[in-house]
Image: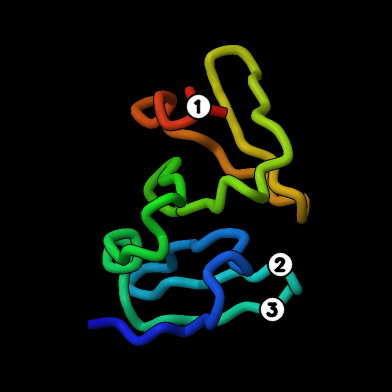
C-alpha cells in the first residue's frame, strides 16, 4: 500500500511520470516525488476522478483551464501554464469537459 504523500488530494494539479517515479505538482508550486509508478497512484481511490490523458500525465480536472485543438492534435492547458498533449487513444477522456 502506498503512503499518502499529500494530505489533501484536491491540492494536486497533476501527477507526472518520471521513469519509475511519480512527481506530484501541487497548486502552491511545490513538487513531491514518490517512489512508485503513476499506475499505482492512478489506482488509488482518492485519485479516481483524475484524468489520464497520456502515458505521463494524470490531471486533476478542477485545474484544467482549456482544451486546445490544433488540427488532429489536442492538448490540455492547466491553470499554472502547463501544456500537456492528449494521446489519440485518450481523446474520449475529454468528452465530459
Q: Which mark is residue 17?
A: none
Cα–Cα span, label 3 and label 2:
7 Å
Q: Along the horizontal axis of the image, is 1 left or right of 93? A: left
When the figure is inspected, residue 43 is found, relative to residue 81, above or below; the finding is below
Q: Nearer the viewer, residue 97 or 30?
A: 97
Residue appearing at x 60%, y 33% in the figure: 75
Q: Position of residue 85 (x, y in %)?
A: 55, 38
Q: Residues within 10 Å of mark 2 (few under 14, many from 20)?
A: some
Q: Nearer the viewer, mark 2 or mark 1?
A: 1
Residue appearing at x 41%, y 46% in the figure: 52
Residue, disc 2: 27
Q: Earlier in the sequence, mark 3 or mark 1?
A: 3
Where is residue 21, by image quadrant?
A: bottom left
Q: Along the horizontal axis of the image, is 16 left or right of 35? A: right
Residue, disc 3: 30
The quadrant in which the C terminus is found is top right
Q: Secondary structure at mark 1?
A: helix
When the figure is inspected, residue 59 is found, relative to residue 16, above or below; the finding is above
Q: Position of residue 82 (x, y in %)?
A: 70, 51
Q: Nearer the viewer, residue 35 or 2?
A: 2
Cα–Cα span, label 2 and label 1:
23 Å
> Residue furthest toward the left?
1
Q: Nearer the viewer, residue 16 or 52?
A: 52
Cα–Cα span, label 3 and label 1:
29 Å
Q: Position of residue 69 (x, y in %)?
A: 64, 20
Q: Residues within 10 Å of mark 3 (few under 14, many from 20)?
A: few
Residue, disc 1: 96
Q: How is the image coloured?
A: rainbow
The quadrant in which the N terminus is found is bottom left
Q: Earlier in the sequence, mark 2 or mark 1?
A: 2
Q: Secondary structure at mark 3?
A: loop
Q: Position of residue 73 (x, y in %)?
A: 55, 22
Amino acid at each position: 500500500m502506498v503512503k499518502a504523500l499529500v494530505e489533501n488530494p484536491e491540492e494536486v494539479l497533476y501527477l507526472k511520470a518520471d521513469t519509475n517515479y511519480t512527481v506530484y505538482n501541487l497548486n502552491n508550486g511545490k513538487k513531491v516525488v514518490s517512489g512508485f509508478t503513476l499506475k499505482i497512484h492512478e489506482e488509488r481511490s482518492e485519485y479516481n476522478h483524475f484524468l489520464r490523458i497520456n502515458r505521463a500525465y494524470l490531471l486533476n480536472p478542477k485545474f484544467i483551464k482549456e482544451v486546445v485543438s490544433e488540427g488532429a492534435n489536442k492538448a490540455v492547458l492547466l491553470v499554472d501554464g502547463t501544456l500537456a498533449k492528449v494521446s489519440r487513444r485518450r481523446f474520449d477522456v475529454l468528452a465530459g469537459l
